[in-house]
Amino acid sequence: MTSLFGSSGIRGIVNHEMTIDLARAVGAAIGGQYRRVVIGKDVRTSGDMIACALSSGIMSCGGDVYDAGMIPTPTLAHATKNYDCGLMITASHNPPEYNGIKMWNPDGSSFDDDQMEDIENAVRELKFKRADWRSVGTKYTHEGAVESHIEIISKLVGPITAKVVVDCGCGATSTITPRLLRELGCSVVSINSHPDGFFPGRSPEPTEDQLVRLRDIVLSENADIGIAHDGDGDRVVMIDEKGRFIGGDKLLALLTAMFGEKEVVTTIDSSMVIDELVEGKVVRTRVGDAYVSNMMKRTGIEFGGEPSGTFIFAKNSLCPDGIYAAALLVKIASENRISELIDSLPNYPSFRGSFNFERTRRKEIKRTLVQEIEKVKCDNLLTVDGFRAEFSDGWFLIRLSGTEPKIRITVEARTEEALTRLKTISMEIARRCIS
Ligand code: MG
């Protein structure tokens, strides 16, 4: 992967890495290649600032800008089908001081490595095709992105009768998920569903410890299900009617089982349960929804997802759509006790952890990791992204995050004893890398 762009496009702290100069340059590179560009932004305080810089860059090279306003990422990806490309200003689940730019194709897939490299090269060399004054671009408004996304999902999912609690984390889904579920026929209680770039309700990352209020309200309201999104709505996680947090790994298994998927594209860090549930092939990619989406595009496989809570259904879009996935989960909860479905899935103990390091040490840490992995005696080593060491009783993955200065560790094993053993080995490797 190129250095300016990570696995999710460009992302960084506002006015440090994510500057208006960078946004204007990216806009200029885009504007030289794509004539009609739709732009969306999530709720972050820096959204307008970056949108303006991006837009002026695009127009300076002759591209027209269509401003879709504050919308979730999957809503922007859907809107992109009417344009040459779409730009989403978001840092997804990162803290509020971050922002970024993610680029989309008309089919809902995000830019692949080649497309990103084209943009990156133009930005690095400052080689832009500036337009003559007669042909600089114009800015328009794109209306109705939320309404048309609601219409697409409503047609695919149909009416639902369920009691649901929705936690949008004050992110971009505040404008769509509670409304969609109500329009489908659900009784909806919403929390943290006012857009706010300070994310006052909880972190934009919907981890278990951030969803205590959601859990309490699911229980006190006797709801069938609780739903939580990340900041920009490409992800969803769930609270079952017993108040248990159900993360992306379990949801990937649930959706695979419920829809009888024959083939699945997933990432190197997802559970071995998927291999057990799928009759046909499981294709594993690097971590990042862009890799899942692009593999689906290449292979024609119709379902894919990541344990982070991104799910892609090709018949909806090649963009992970947490809003569509939420509607599917609520539909499932309206027809079943969702806790019973969860309990019927194979269940192995697992662990996820991370170690922070200073951004400047990335190369050095990567080198040490290679040396440390060479010493590990495992049955099989997958190197598609980081190192997944597989043993007869489980596996662990150690990799550097594509978006943050972090070593991420994932461990899954058939027994608690094996989990403890593999967790100890992998955490010691990570500690030696950052020491
Ligand atoms: Mg996201």
Image: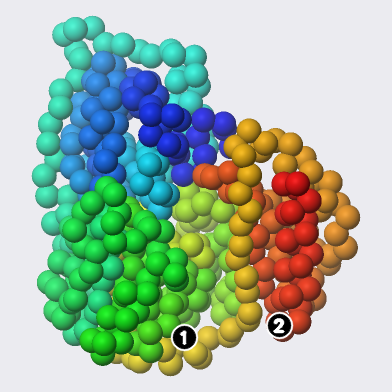
Element assignment for label 1? helix
Q: Quadrant of the N terminus?
A: top right
Element assignment for label 2? helix
- Mark closest to the chain's N terminus, 2 or 1: 1
Crowding at mark 1 (Cα within 10 Å: few <14, some 14-19, many 20+) = some
Front residue of this view, candidates 319 and 90: 90
Residue at 32% across, 81% down: 216
Residue kind at label 2, given as amino acid type: Glu
Query: x and y percent of residue 215 in the render?
Result: 35, 79
Residue kind at label 1, given as amino acid type: Ile
| Left or right relative to 425: residue 97 | left
Q: CA distance from mark 2 to mark 1?
A: 20 Å
Front residue of this view, candidates 356 and 365: 356
For mark 2, what is the residue? 416
- On screen, residue 35 above or below 159: above
For mark 1, what is the residue? 342
Front residue of this view, candidates 270 and 427: 427
| Left or right relative to 177: residue 393 | right
Q: Can you see residue 84? A: no
Residue at 34% across, 25% down: 20
| Left or right relative to 317: residue 36 | left
Query: x and y percent of residue 372 in the render?
Result: 83, 51
Location of residue 66 by image quarter: top left
Q: Can you see residue 342? A: yes
Residue at 23% across, 51% down: 196
Query: x and y percent of residue 263 in the render?
Result: 53, 69
**Of marks 2 and 1, the one in the foreground:** 2
Residue at 63% across, 81% down: 348
